[in-house]
């Protein structure tokens, strides 16, 4: 036994999530946000399968991500969110990458190089993008025909109580109306896809929904889990009532407990704050995490499982994340979002494709 955690990656779940998003955005091209190594799952696994499923357009954050992605999808379009840096034109041309232009400086750098860029319009998020007041300045450097896409980004589409998404949608529609000729528009992330067709325009570019998470983990949307994270039991111990478990002794057993120590920890992305909050699953039986999460080890109370007649042994596999412990549930326990959990996955896993 290698005594390290393993990560199952499901092609079936990935493709099912993509097809569901395509159906929801029927009439619009469904691109894929595949930045941060496909949200931690691996572009080598994700990109070819999405391309085979019909995805023709991908988005990454950095040019170096696009260079790596190119080897897996030679014929796809690849847009780079973070713009066109100084002296980057040759890199974009060589690897057939298309910059998302976020500023007038980006626009000026792209002028005359036929990069088929996207123009990012700031519709109110105030993070990246060109003001609608500066659109005329864009066309001093680029003709409308040189632009492959006009895009913006929703800041709070998952919050149905907020009017911000509708305000951004109207601002984006206004920007498209100022465009001198018909150019595809893209506004919707996963949360935007889930709203209604008024947000879809000609292209949607989901991210988290592809990988099994929901934009708001407290409002699960039923996407299939693409990854299943399991860790082996290293040791089973009997802990008496009142005895401490883990660093700092912050957890003390309130009864005699059967405690299993698992070979995974925060070095693999299992956040330290999950100690005393989360649960794992042992043959489908939920077992609470007790004591602090360590770098390489997690301790769990398996007393109920044992009382039900289960036998815990070294090498027994325990689900940290998967069909029983959902990505959204784990995010809620960690007081974070599923995006962070996936992108923190470490590099020590045995990877298994299904």
Image (spheres, rainbow, N blue to C red):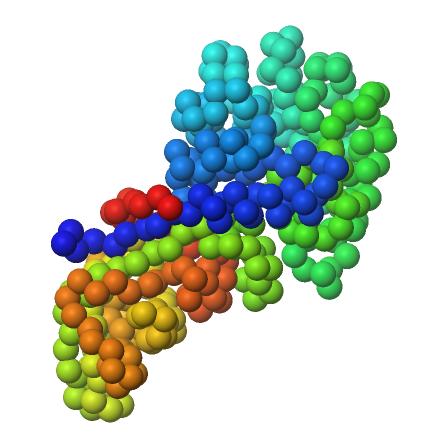
Q: Where is residue 34 in the image (x, y as percent from the top left)?
A: 50, 37
**Numbered circles on residues, count:** 0
User: From what the image shows, is residue 303 above or below residue 197?
Assistant: below
Q: Can residue 189 be seen in this view?
A: no
Pick the residue in front: 182 or 6.
Answer: 6
Going by the image, does 281 lie left or right of 117?
left
Q: In this view, does 218 lie to the left or right of 193?
A: left
Residue 155, image x, y percentages: 65, 49
Task: Give above or below for 50 relative to 167.
Answer: above
**Residue 212 visible to an observer of this rendering:** yes
Of 187 and 86, nearer the camera is: 187
Looking at the image, which residue is at 35% across and 50% down? 8
What residue is shown at x 47% (from left), y 66% (from top)?
Answer: 329
Residue at image point 55% right, 55% down: 223
Question: Where residue 288 appears, x then y in whole percent?
Answer: 33, 76
Looking at the image, residue 83 lies above or below residue 315: above
Residue beneath the point at 42% across and 66% down: 324
Quarter occupied by the N terminus: bottom left
209 left or right of 12 in image:
right
Question: x, y percentage for residue 303?
Answer: 26, 82
């Amino acid at each position: 036994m290698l005594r390290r955690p393993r990560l199952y990656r499901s092609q079936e779940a990935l493709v099912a999530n993509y097809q569901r998003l395509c159906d929801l955005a029927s009439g619009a091209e469904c691109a894929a946000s595949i930045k941060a190594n496909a949200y931690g799952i691996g572009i080598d696994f994700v990109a070819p399968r999405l391309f085979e499923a019909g995805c023709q357009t991908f988005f990454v954050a950095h040019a170096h991500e696009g260079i790596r992605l190119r080897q897996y999808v030679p014929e796809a379009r690849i847009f780079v969110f973070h713009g066109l840096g100084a002296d980057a034109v040759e890199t974009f041309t060589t690897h057939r990458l298309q910059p998302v232009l976020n500023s007038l400086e980006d626009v000026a750098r792209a002028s005359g190089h036929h990069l088929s860029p996207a123009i990012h319009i700031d519709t109110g998020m105030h993070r990246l993008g060109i003001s609608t007041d500066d659109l005329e300045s864009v066309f001093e450097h680029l003709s409308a025909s040189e632009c492959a896409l006009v895009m913006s980004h929703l800041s709070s589409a998952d919050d149905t109580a907020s009017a911000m998404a509708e305000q951004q949608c109207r601002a984006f529609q206004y920007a498209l109306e100022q465009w001198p000729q018909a150019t595809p528009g893209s506004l919707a992330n996963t949360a935007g896809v889930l709203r209604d067709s008024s947000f879809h325009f000609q292209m949607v570019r989901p991210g988290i929904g592809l990988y099994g998470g929901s934009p708001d983990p407290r409002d699960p949307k039923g996407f299939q889990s693409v990854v299943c994270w399991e860790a082996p039991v290293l040791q089973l111990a009997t802990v008496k009532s009142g005895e401490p478990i883990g660093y700092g002794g912050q957890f003390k057993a309130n009864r005699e407990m059967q405690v299993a120590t698992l070979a995974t920890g925060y070095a693999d992305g299992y956040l330290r704050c999950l100690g005393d909050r989360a649960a794992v699953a042992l043959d489908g039986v939920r077992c609470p995490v007790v004591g602090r999460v360590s770098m390489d080890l997690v301790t769990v109370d398996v007393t109920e499982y044992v009382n039900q007649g289960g036998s815990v042994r070294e090498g027994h596999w325990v689900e940290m994340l998967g069909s029983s412990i959902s990505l959204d549930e784990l995010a809620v326990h960690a007081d974070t979002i599923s995006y962070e959990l996936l992108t923190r996955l470490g590099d020590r896993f045995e990877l298994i494709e299904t």
